[in-house]
Amino acid sequence: MAQADPRELQALQFYLNEYGQQAEIFTRQLELIEQRRIEALAAIESIRSLNAEKEPVVLVPLGGGTTVRARVENPGKVLVNIGADTILQRTQEEAVTFLSDRITEMEAMEKKVAGTLEQLRGQINEIARKIEAAYGQAQPPAGS
């Protein structure tokens, strides 16, 4: 049996490591997108719940693990960060629509990243099979 080329094995191992690192990055990106999507859904729920009370009270984090209760003066108006540190005042429905659109964008991003991750995992599996086959060729047959 022919022995596996050490340079080829080294190259395959390099690609396996690189693809593994990329897969970790895409996995973290998926987790971050999902976390932001859940936060946006929670924000929509909170905005809608402001109408449930005559004088709604919310918890406002101050930092360092401290929170205060605060009465919402104008629950009909919501400040929305639209990106690049730009904040606009919107009605509750406009804010919900904005967040819903953002959720739709995040879901599309999740699908794209998940598809890329799936392709990457396929490549990782293929390289791992090649490495395994190369090492299998290098092993002497049983009983020799």
Image (cartoon, rainbow, N blue to C red):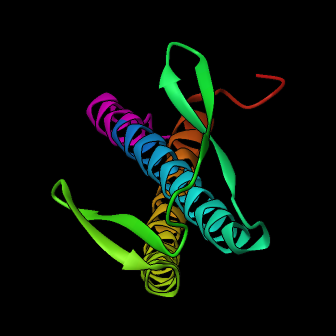
Give percent across and percent down for residue 82: 27, 68
The correct choice, above or below, for 130 with respect to 47 in the image is above
Counting the numbered discs, the total is 0
Residue that protrudes farthest toward the top in the picture = 64
Q: Quadrant of residue 89?
A: bottom left
Q: Is residue 29 left or right of residue 72?
A: left
The correct choice, above or below, for 129 with respect to 42 in the image is above
Q: Is residue 84 left or right of residue 77?
A: left
The correct choice, above or below, for 63 with respect to 133 in the image is above
User: Relative to the observer, which residue lies in front, 125 or 4?
Assistant: 125
Magenta region: which residues? 1-17
Quadrant where the C terminus sits is: top right
Which secondary structure is most common in the magenta stretch? helix
Q: Quadrant of residue 112?
A: bottom left
Q: Quadrant of residue 14?
A: top left
The correct choice, above or below, for 130 with respect to 63 in the image is below
Give percent across and percent down for residue 127: 47, 50
Give percent across and percent down for residue 78: 43, 68
- In the image, what residue occupies the spot 51% across and 58% down? 73
- In the image, what residue occupies the spot 54% across and 66% down? 118
Residue 128 belongs to magenta span: no
User: Relative to the observer, which residue lies in front, 100 or 92?
Assistant: 92
- In the image, what residue occupies the spot 54% across and 30% down? 61
Give percent across and percent down for residue 47: 61, 68
- In the image, what residue occupies the spot 29% across and 37% down? 11
